[in-house]
Amino acid sequence: MSTPAPTILVVEDDDIVRMLIVDVLEELEFKVLEADDGEPALAILADAGNSIDLMMTDFGLPGMDGRELANKARELRPALPILFASGYAENIDVPADMHVIGKPFSIDQLRDKVKSIIQ
């Protein structure tokens, strides 16, 4: 019996960027849930029926920013790994137990980063 594929929640307000990230992650055989902003992401996280192994979020979301979303996500799921994607990766202050990947990133960089978080 094979283990189910890890599930990644992708939160990205740019439809094209989100679609590309989702396509890459699905090609890498992850199950992907997606949201275009913080509120729908929190609704997905609040649903106990959703098994989520990682939340990957844009840092600069239009409503609540990625850090606010991460804090609220951790209230719902305290052990949830969080990966921020940012075009300004070197300028953001990320909590020690969270991860960051700089945009633009290659498919290989995304794969390696995700696999390093989800062991």
Image: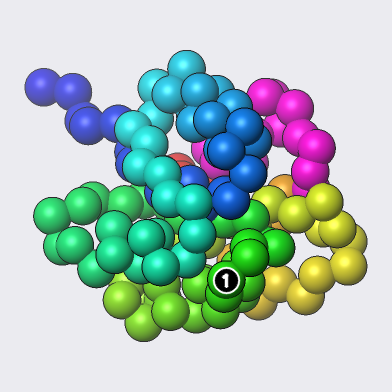
Please give left or right for residue 3 compared with residue 11 in the image: left
Q: Nearer the viewer, residue 30 or 62?
A: 62
Please give left or right for residue 26 compared with residue 20 in the image: left
Badge 1: residue crowd in 10 Å (few <14, some 14–19, many ≥20):
few
Magenta segment range? 102-116
Who's the residue at 63% across and 55% down the image? Answer: 58
* Residue 9 included in the magenta stretch of the image: no
Who's the residue at 38% across and 36% down the image? Answer: 32
For residue 21, say whether it is visible.
no
Who's the residue at 37% across and 60% down the image? Answer: 40
Who's the residue at 71% across and 72% down the image? Answer: 94
Relative to 65, is 6 above or below? above
Quarter placement of the N terminus: top left
Residue 39 at x, y percent in the picture: 41, 68
Residue 9 at x, y percent in the picture: 41, 48
The residue beneath circle 1 is: 63
Where on the picture, by quarter, is residue 92?
bottom right
For residue 105, say whether it is visible.
yes
Where on the picture, by quarter, is residue 105?
top right
Quarter placement of the C terminus: top left
Which amino acid type is shown beneath numbered disc 1?
A: Gly
Q: Nearer the viewer, residue 17 or 26?
A: 17
